[in-house]
Amino acid sequence: MISVKGITKLYGDKKVVDDVSLSIAKGKITSLIGPNGAGKSTVLSMITRLLDNDSGDVLLEGENIFTQPNSELAKKISTLKQSNHLELKITVRELIAFGRYPYSKGRLTETDNALIDEAIRYMELGEFEDRFIDELSGGQRQRAYIAMTIAQDTEYIFLDEPLNNLDMKHSVQIMQILRRLVRERNKTIIIVIHDINFASCYSDNIVALKDGEVAVSGTKNEVIKKEILEDIYEMDINIECIMGHQICIYFDEHADATVDDFVKEQAQI
Amino acid sequence: MLKDYKNKLLLGLAIAALLVTGFYMLYQIDMDIFFYQAPSRIRRILAIIIVGVAIAVSTVIFQTIVKNRILTPSIMGLDSVYVFIQTTIVFLAGVGSPLLLNSHLNYFLSLTLLTLFTLFVFRYLFRLTRNNIFILLLIGIILGTFFGNLSTFMQQLISPDDFLVLQNALFASFNAVNENLMVLTAVILVIMLIIVFMDFHSLDVLALGRDAAINLGVNYDRKVSQLLVIIAILVSVSTALVGPIMFLGLLVVNIAHELFKTYKHVYLLIGTSLISIIALIIGQMIVQFVFQNSVEISVIINLVGGVYFIYLMLRRGRK
Amino acid sequence: MAQKLFRLDVLIIILIILSIISMFIGVIPLSINEIFSLSEQQQNILANSRFPRTVSIIIAGASLAVSGLIMQQLTRNKFVSPTTAGTMDWAQLGILLGIISFPAINLFGRLAFALVLAMFGTLLFMQIITRIKLKDVIFVPLIGLMLGGVVSSIATFIALRTNSLQAISGWMHGSFSTVISGRYEILYISIPLLIIAVLFANQFTVAGMGEDFSKNLGMNYTRILYTGLFITAAITALVVVTVGMLPFLGLIIPNIVSMFKGDHLQKTIYPTAVLGAIFVMFCDILGRVLIYPYEISVGLMIAIFGSFIFLWMIYRRVKTNA
């Protein structure tokens, strides 16, 4: 379990993250949601020690992460940030091999190679193995990066907006992979995500941030509620249950919309 | 298979380096003055190897840190600082000053001041600019312009005869390198190389960027500031030994990238060093055999490197 | 306070006061009390040395500052200027080539060489910055400065071959001490260029928004772009030919004005011109009095003040962007 205790980040005099406390349950997907500028990515970066915090603590299984050696931490948590455009000439396999760096320090053993092969299989990247990263499509590249974190073999996986720039098909594919990782390998996954419906459909717990503070946190059914979301996003949101999922409807509603209009709209889609 | 290709390439470059060295040693060798000619050429070759490796290694590491293939540590005004140091000596103490003529004194003075300047720009300003390396370089260049203008001003006030003496000190030259200093520089270089090669795998990780490197357990900030100190020392020793060669690093690292097409630092570090040695020997041959020493090698290298730089910039967009 | 100081009328009054001071400072004493009882020698000095000097300071300062402003508008980058785009180095190389090819070349000939190379250099710079992927606001001037480094190393090569390094670095270092009547009038060409710049000012802003944006507004993008580039290249060439390199001017003056006046060209272009003249005049006067009766060249004074102001600008930027 990870417990975050009152972390704060200041930029100049401005508090971008203000006294955020939360706990992350093991073996679940936890989503961080909230409007732009709510501090989601900043919180994620601080929990994963990519960014120094100005106050507060992050405890991993009861131990403060800031006092642990970085190299040991790399075997427990892995992070994937949203800006991953490398200009390096590096193949998919070489990238995934970096996931073993915390263990092998660059000198790959038999075990390492076996784990790399396994990660490639798991993410179905076999045919791209020797292709350069910059020759892949967005979805393939994202899969390659996730394969790297699989090779890193950490209990906790943090992803910052993993669906950025992906179309619907690839977004669903990535989310299904994450669910599978939780189900089959008992990983704990924390994602920053914009689309509240993806958050609602695929996560177990949701933490909603607003203006650098935790607005609500709880199971998805506790958070995906009309009053709560309307308060966070400051707009009209209706929630419908569709095929067992809570789906947020935030389209502009015409005052005089008729059934005919709805049918026409459907036909266009 | 790919690995094989890269190893062959390294071997090829090593052979090429040996060939140009051999050619340089034997070309126009005169048996009557052999005992004068050979040692002087060997000395130059050794100086070239030291400087070539120092500049190649520092540039490769620097570009890994800044994640940019165009920027090199030598553009941040080091050459102007070097010119400023030499000009100030002549201006204040005259051309007869031991600070200029005694190569030991001059070396230590230049080395100290250059290292201090680089460390100041890197360490202090790194914090101030919050790791924004572009701003860092810009500040370096501005300081360079500032020193450059001070030098120009002083150069106008000294007599034309003094200026000619000064001019010789201002340009990189392998012709009159002091042996003791060469040994000293070689020792410093080897120490730095050992530190770098002990942990060269982490350079590969650094190339992935700060976030990815921390994620993989590298102590990014500490590692980078350690490497910046190494770069500062390497650039300063080579400048203090022979003078500034601004575009050498840019030229050789980019050729290495073209040839090896890899991110792996084993190949990049060794490959760039070999290319750097080859480039300097060819430059030295042009200076010595074509221009009969009437041009300085730094000018030739800057000319070629500069034109290559413009070519690189124009080609980038077309991809 | 600062707001008031940057009012156009206040700036003009400061410039007039400085100009009068400038007329009466020099090795040959000349007091303002004697203005109606000048000896022939004094009249001579005033007409042939002090007046040309003062006028050329005003023209050079104003036009370089404005050309920096235009470049910043066209590239939409506040750190681009004749210095940081390498234009000055190209002009310098041009003059050098002119002198090497035709040793007896006159001022117009030098200007022609400087202009052709400055224009070529500016176009090359524009080509490069439209091609690079990384349009970072600091990376762009870094490229320009490196380009300038390449060009000046070519100049050094030529100078070394012809054994004229000291002479060249001497007259390239910006100075108004050699400005006397008969040798500076060419600088007047800058005035019509300045007028064109003012007339086109708004279009430059639009062109800076990009080709699609300007076409959308029905503008001939290419023509405006080339007009702007030509004006900056020509002004740079003129100044370098008559007084030498004046670094940083086109960079810092527009930036200082924009801090207080915003970025609307119509509001900033006149203050930029006047402040440019004031700055150069101030540096020149200071250079003349500091080690009187000797002179510190204005190029050095500008470099000293300019680098510190520029560093302060970067520092401010880093602070506010934190």
Image: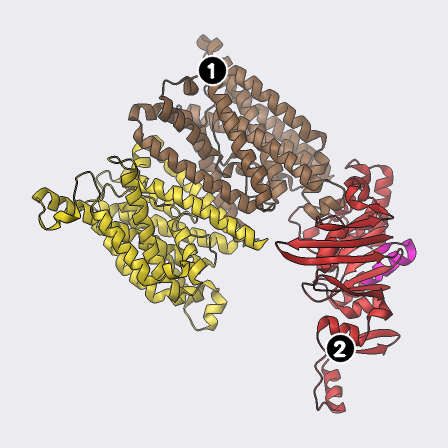
Chain colours: A red, B brown, C yellow
The C terminus of chain A: image quadrant? bottom right
For the residue pair A183 and C291, the one nearer the viewer reads as: C291
Amino acid type indicated by mark 2: Ile
Is A187 colored magenta in this rendering?
yes
For the residue pair A257 and A113, the one nearer the viewer reads as: A257
Indicate left or right for A235 with C247 as reference: right
Task: Indicate the quadrant where residue C263 lies.
Answer: bottom left
Q: Which is closer to the viewer, label 2 or label 1?
A: 2
Residue A235 lies, in percent from the top left, at 71, 76
Residue C131 lies, in percent from the top left, at 52, 54
User: Dot 2 corresponds to which residue?
Assistant: A237
Q: Secondary structure at mark 1?
A: loop
Q: Which residues are magenta?
A: A175-188
Which chain letter goes with mark 2?
A
**In the rendered image, is residue B281 in sight?**
no
**SS majority, magenta:** helix
For the residue pair A265 and B162, the one nearer the viewer reads as: B162
Amino acid type indicated by mark 1: Ile
Indicate left or right for A30 with C92 as reference: right
Task: Indicate the quadrant where residue A71 lies.
Answer: top right
- The residue that appears at 38% across and 42% down in the rendered structure is C303
Task: Indicate the quadrant where residue B293 lies.
Answer: top left
Which label belongs to residue B29? Answer: 1
Q: Secondary structure at mark 2?
A: loop
Residue C4 lies, in percent from the top left, at 38, 61
Q: CA distance from mark 2 to mark 1?
A: 88 Å
